[in-house]
Image (cartoon, rainbow, N blue to C red):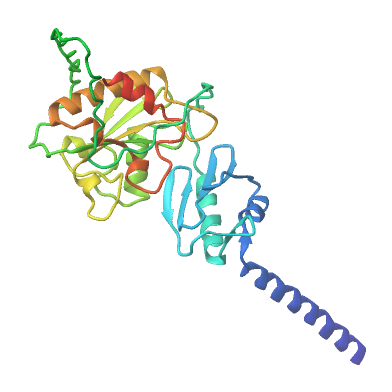
Amino acid sequence: MARRFAAALVSACVLLGAWAAHAQADETRRSTLQLAAIHGLTHTDKGNHVLLERGTVRLRAYPGTATMLVSGRQFRVKDRFEREGGRVMVSPRVQRFMARQLREARTVVLTTPARTTSRTGARPPLEPLPPRMTRVKREPRKTRTTPQPKPAPKPRTTARADRGWIPGVDERPWKWIVIHHSDDRSGNMAKYDRIHREENGWENGCGYHFVVGNGSLSGDGQIEIGPRWKAQLQGAHAKVPGNRFNEKGIGICLVGDFDEGGRRPTPAQMEELVRLIRWLQARYRVQDADLRGHCDCCTTQCPGRFFPWDELRQRLR
């Protein structure tokens, strides 16, 4: 009898020790490489951020900050991601938060196949423009004494307005145009409006004023108008101290992920984006220096490393 009791006591101690070790392991800091193996994701260290992905689920963690993106949604976590010995370490409570967000991201099912067309040879975007500054090219010094007539400046083409672009209410004194990408491959205004209402709790719906489709859940190049533009409400797309880019910045989102794989906007998206920007600049007198990317306002890669800034600025001349 005593031997049985002793054996049972030893077994209980072993189980208790294993449970304690497991609990202690759950409270240890892990690297993003370990977390990728745990959750069945690939791991890529991009330098300024770490990418964990599988299929349509993508998680980006930015070392030195408390910023994390999961399938296009940005979060401010409790603890900063710190780089130690070449690896990015994650605290226990941020690990639990990451696991919860990954589970939620995996439950999202897109009803339309994602676009797989890509374009190679993309050039990186230009450096962010400094605030309220433009560069003026000086005329070369003329050697002729006879004055030469200056050619008349080429007028900028005024784009036509689609139905609904002109609001039926008093218009805001818009000052900036801020360009985003959706950081996914399939979407439309209805999708982002639902996410922002149900998941972010924003009663005014989609934080962007316009969404330009890529042919997945809306037409290729189709410009959809958000509820905030129709009511001339401030956006919810570029939060900074003072909130100036939301209060006076027009948010335009292109459906697509232009940060990975060299993917760029479709030709139809670029054509319609140029037309919309020309109209907005003419109506609200937005200067070229005030056309910005989300990355020029906040700490983010949006609208992606492969967004064709050089092409856009050339076509807007």
Q: From where the camera sits, is residue 1 visible?
A: no
238 vs 256, nearest the viewer = 238
Q: Quadrant of residue 24?
A: bottom right
For this view, does 108 lie left or right of residue 182? right
295 vs 110, nearest the viewer = 295
Give coordinates of residue 223: x percent, y percent.
29, 25
Residue lying at 14% horizontally and 31% vertically, measured from the top left: 284
As displayed, is residue 170 above or below residue 236? Answer: above
155 vs 119, nearest the viewer = 155
Residue lying at 14% horizontally and 30% vertically, measured from the top left: 285
For this view, does 5 lie left or right of residue 42? right
134 vs 195, nearest the viewer = 134
Residue lying at 21% horizontally and 48% vertically, measured from the top left: 244
Give coordinates of residue 288: x percent, y percent.
24, 30
Give coordinates of residue 299: x percent, y percent.
39, 49
Residue positioned most to the bottom: 2
As displayed, is residue 5 above or below residue 181? Answer: below
As displayed, is residue 150 above or below residue 180? Answer: above
What is the number of callouts on the image? 0
Give coordinates of residue 5: x percent, y percent.
86, 88
The C terminus lies in which quarter of the figure?
Answer: top left
The N terminus lies in which quarter of the figure?
Answer: bottom right
For this view, does 5 lie left or right of residue 309? right
Q: From where the camera sits, is residue 193 visible?
A: yes
Q: In which quarter of the image is residue 208?
A: top left
